[in-house]
Amino acid sequence: MYKAFLLLSCLIVRDAFASLCFPDYCRNTTNLIPEPGERCLLEPVQRGAECMEMRFENLGHLPPTGEPLAQVSLVAYVHDFGNLKGKATAFNSSISDINFNRLTMRYQTLGDEKTSACRNVRFYGNASNLPLQDFFVSCPFYNSSFENSPYRLEYLVSGPNYEYSRKLVFIVPNHIFIDNAIKDITRFTPFIYVDVSDASTLTLYIQTLPKRFNVSAYKVWMINNDTNSTKDIILENPNGEKLIHHNFTVHDGVLFFKVAALHPTCHANGCINSTSPFISIKQASHRLLIMIISVIWIPPVMFYALYHAYKLYKKKEILKRAERKPMCLLVYTPSHMAHVNAMVDLARYLRCCNINAMIDTLDIPESTNKDPVLWCNEAFQAAEVIIIATSPRTDEIAPVIYRNMDSQALRLLKENYPLRNKRRSSLARFTRKDHKF
């Protein structure tokens, strides 16, 4: 047995980054036959049908008595590709106490198994060997197009005479909301993921906010989408751990989690919340015995089977549509500073409601090029819903940096109108007296 600290990051990368993904004492090769003295070998990233169809057996099983459970810990961070490509979310995955021989991992988009990436790692040695130091595979996502998408990370651990696998699900956070450059806590979201390896217990993990925000508690909601029931708890972090977790006993239904940091600056239910993917739980049911007494029973039985097949199909379609956060562009005229502030508050509120609200004041400073026109064009193309706010008439324009964004967005909307691929809504609720929504 030997120990190591394993850092594995997102495997969806280009070959150009391969040389940066692992230390020089671990060799990247397609031939997993070690040379004398080698401690680990890893294969290049695999894609295609073989990776997509790979089976991870013994989900949720435990290692033999006396062997520690290998658990991957995910930590999200922002990788800077430089001025030409900008920033994107990346992940560090860590495993301590490596006492096994082989590790197989696969990142896969939920609802689109074709987007898959796999990697095999082999470890060699015995208890007399010195432990590996800072073994890592640190490869970020190629760009930000994967952000806001639901993913799963599956990994298979193989020892001398045992095998088991585990599964983690998460939504890739937008790098804009986890960047260390953020100073305003109302714009920072915690990264969360859920271990769904055990059908009766879900383990929620929260990557805590940076210490500069001084957050020691998080509010968690577990919501059953079938029954509209909600269970909420407060998780404390008195010791300043980077990852905290909690086990939830679950029953049948479609569940998801929301997590918000608690801070005096935010409202009573916390700051901007993070959301997990939808998780469908179906416990093993008792065997259903049907006795067909005569031919008369056949049509009702067939109808019953078709009805339940239809329900399963509809539920799967609903889950696919619900996995991705809707993209919403807010269009307004900065005719009054109170109106600008109200629109910013609306954007933050929509983000708390699991909607990716895009607004110039908050998003242009965080964009790669910081070009207002370019940001407006990209935001319009990404938007599924466009909200046009009726702005109050005043003699002056508010002292804001970004102007004429409303004219640009309305021009794009007019040009796009024949395609009819954008949902439009108008919002008119502005009071001159208090200048608030």
Image (cartoon, grey):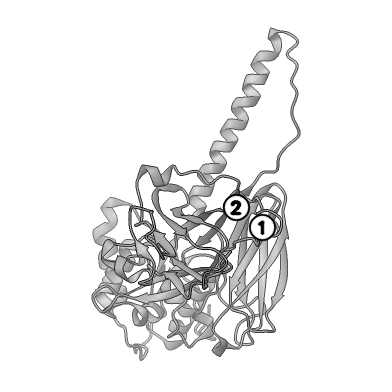
Write down the residue under mark 1: 202
Closer to us: 30 or 197: 30
Q: Residue at x 75, y 23 (%)?
A: 289
Chain-order first, disc 1 or disc 2 = 1
Quadrant assignment for the N terminus: bottom right
Q: Residue furthest top?
A: 294
Q: Amino acid at mark 2?
A: Ile
Visible residue check, residue 195: yes
For residue 412, above or below residue 296: below
Element assignment for label 1: strand
Closer to us: 366 or 103: 103
Closer to us: 105 or 274: 105
Q: Residue at x 45, y 83 (%)?
A: 180
The local crowd at label 2, few if under 14, some if 14 to 19, many if 20 or more residues have their Cα within 10 Å, is: some
Question: Relative to 419, is 263 on the left or the right?
Answer: right
Question: Relative to 73, is 45 on the left or the right?
Answer: left
Visible residue check, residue 425: no
The local crowd at label 1, few if under 14, some if 14 to 19, many if 20 or more residues have their Cα within 10 Å, is: many
Question: What x and y, as percent, mark residue 304?
Answer: 65, 25
Question: What x and y, as percent, mark residue 12?
Answer: 37, 60
Answer whether labels 1 and 2 touch (C-beta < 8 Å): yes
Quadrant housing residue 388: bottom left
Q: Amino acid at mark 1?
A: Leu
Write down the residue under mark 2: 279
For residue 243, above or below residue 124: below
Question: What x and y, as percent, mark residue 261?
Answer: 61, 78
Quadrant housing residue 336: bottom left
For the residues carrying marks 1 and 2, which lies nearer the camera in this image?
1
Element assignment for label 2: strand
Q: Between marks 1 and 2, how big is the CA–CA gap?
A: 10 Å
